[in-house]
Image (spheres, rainbow, N blue to C red):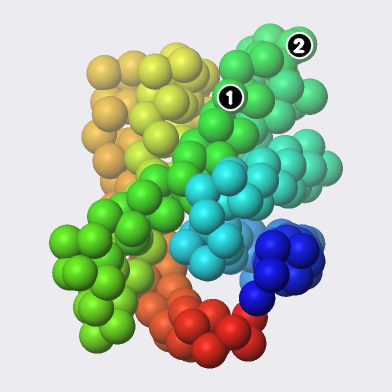
Amino acid sequence: MNRQTAKYRDFVLLALFAAIILLLAFTPIGYIQLPIIKATIVHVPVILGAIILGPKKGAILGVLFGLTSFISNTFMPTALSFAFSPAIPLPGTPNGSIWSLFICFVPRILVGVFAYYVFALCQKLMKKSTKGEFLSLAIGALVGSFTNTILVMGSIFVIFKDAYAAIKGIPADAVMGAILAVVGANGVPEAVAAIVLTVAIGKALLGLQRKGRV
């Protein structure tokens, strides 16, 4: 495959992953409304896209993931949407915070970057074994998923601790426990979903990629 053909193929695949992100994000499948926060599987195509296309395109898909989160939280807000959109006022104030854009975009950009490099490192340690791809995909998906969960919830704790306590009706010193509860309740199922889908779809895509079909 020559360079021009490879660039065209990568562009088409990038567009396909982007379309999947949009489809998931703007249907009930992608963002699952919960009482405080929205659970998501939109990170899965970001992880897959990064592993197949590399960290730069994974970061681009992460930006799109962040954009869909911004739109969802701006126009279909939950109690915690102030942490993802500056258009949503903090509890008890008339204004939002620009720091919400950091939470909305930076962890999502890093999902694809970390997932790719962890996958690549695992494959290097396994000497690029095709059988080892199952484990490499699983670990890459696990890291990518928890990158999103831990960085988002960790940033909320650091930046919006008092606001989070206000919406939960808990003292500020109880916020860490509440954050960890969300990580367990949302982050673990999201990671399991990411691992299952990434291994199943990623293994097939990598096989096709080796045959020059993608």
Q: Write the residue at 36% across / 40% down.
A: 150
User: What residue is disc 1 on?
Assistant: 102
Indicate whether 200 appears above or below 79.
below
Q: CA distance from mark 2 to mark 1?
A: 20 Å
From where the camera sits, is residue 24 visible? no
Tell me the tag on residue 94.
2
The amino acid at mark 2 is: Pro
Task: Classify residue 188 as left or right of residue 62.
Answer: left
Q: Position of residue 196 (x, y in %)?
A: 39, 78
Q: Is residue 141 left or right of residue 55?
A: left
Q: Is residue 60 at all visible to an observer of this figure?
A: yes
Report helix, strand or loop for mark 1: helix
Residue at the spot 67% in from the left edge and 15% down from the top edge: 98
Q: What type is the residue that disc 1 sits on?
A: Phe
- Which disc number belongs to residue 81? none
Dividing the picture into quarters, in which one does residue 189 lie? bottom left
The image quadrant that residue 31 belongs to is: bottom right
Residue 202: give x, y in percent of width and height.
46, 77
| Image position of 184 (left or right of 168) | left
